[in-house]
Amino acid sequence: MKPVNQLILSAIELLPKPVVKRFARRYIAGEELVDAIRVVTAINSQNMMGTMDVLGESVSIREESLAAVRECEEVLHSINNNHLDSNLSIKLTQFGLRIDEGFCYSNVKRLLEIASGYNNFVRIDMEDSSTTTPTLELYERLRSEGFENLGVVIQANMRRSENDIQHLISMKANIRLCKGAYLEPETIAFRDKEEIRLNYVKLLKMLLDGKCYVGMATHDDFLVDVGYRYIQEMNLQKSDYEFQMLYGVRSKLRDQIVADGHRLRLYVPFGQHWYVYSMRRFKENPQVVRYVLRALFYRD
């Protein structure tokens, strides 16, 4: 980690929770569903789509997982009732992946059934490397049962991702491609910035060649430019892809992508667990801290 990033992180860890909240609120909608509805309504008015995420992960108590399912059910109902252009993102450890995989499966299936009734979509987020295999196995199981309204995430920093994508292409999977935020051992993950970039480019080309719908999730100008180039070279239609970014990050780049005529989706997290989520993101991806600092003091 760069010394300047380490310095910023050390300073944030010493700050009182209300001060940290000032940083976090730049990219977290708030603590309640009404906050997320407000944010998604606003971004929809700016021709941007949303993905709502109820914060929480690594749940070890069944009742907490069931409570999270109920919250996500309410999100899906609210998206429909408020006529929002948004889908839902979930983390499997919040739904009981580490408690019992069968229990987790039934929880996700319940949400997919509700989402299907609203012609909506659910994205399974990718967590740390200990969950990669069970996440992909659960995704494949649900797809084999006919749930087409389900997507998954692939992280370009993981060395296994090329093999995973080769299998997912055969399923015409809907994939969110990101760099990856979790710190993983070098034996299983690329750590160098340029290596991750190059792998992202390689994986993106594989997915687009394989006719998969891709959510290009990045705040990296270089990767956005690569996406633009592939869109032009492959003569892609808007229904073939979208760009994705975090809410509150790099607003100038976000607005430019929309102005250039591309579909853009913003990830809109909310919930009571905002502090734990924020500190994890700050630690695992110090660049987010710098984005937030810049957003607090400058218009980008």
Image (spheres, rainbow, N blue to C red):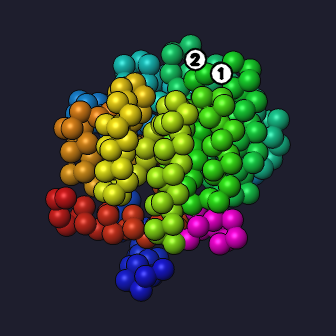
Give the amino acid at mark 2: Ser
Secondary element under disc 1, as helix, strand or loop, is: loop
> Within 10 Å of the Cα at label 1, are there few (<14), some (14-19), or many (20+) other Cα atoms?
some
Main SS of the magenta part reads: loop
- Foreground pick, 252 / 276: 252
Q: Say which quarter of the image contains residue 24.
A: bottom left
**Residue 190 vertical position relative to residue 274 in the rendered view, above or below:** below
Q: Residue furthest front?
A: 233
- Residue 20: x, y in percent? 39, 67
The quarter of the image holding the C terminus is bottom left
- Residue 292: x, y in percent? 32, 63
**Res. 41 mark:** none
Dot 2 and dot 1 residues touching (CB under 8 Å): yes
- Foreground pick, 128 / 297: 128
Q: Residue at x 65, y 21 (%)?
A: 147
Residue 189 shown in magenta: yes
The residue identified by callout 1 is 147
Q: Residue at x 37, y 45 (%)?
A: 227
Q: Residue at x 19, y 38 (%)?
A: 259
The residue identified by callout 2 is 116
Secondary element under disc 2, as helix, strand or loop, is: helix
- Foreground pick, 20 / 210: 210
**Residue 170 vertical position relative to residue 206 in the rendered view, above or below:** above
Say whether residue 36 is left or right of residue 123: left
Task: Give how far apart the Cα atoms at labels 2 and 1 are.
Answer: 8 Å
User: Can residue 279 be seen here?
Assistant: no
Between marks 2 and 1 in the image, the one whose residue lies nearer the viewer: 1
> Could you tell which of marks 2 and 1 lies nearer the N-terminus?
2
Q: Say which quarter of the image contains residue 123.
A: top right
Q: Which residues are magenta?
A: 182-191
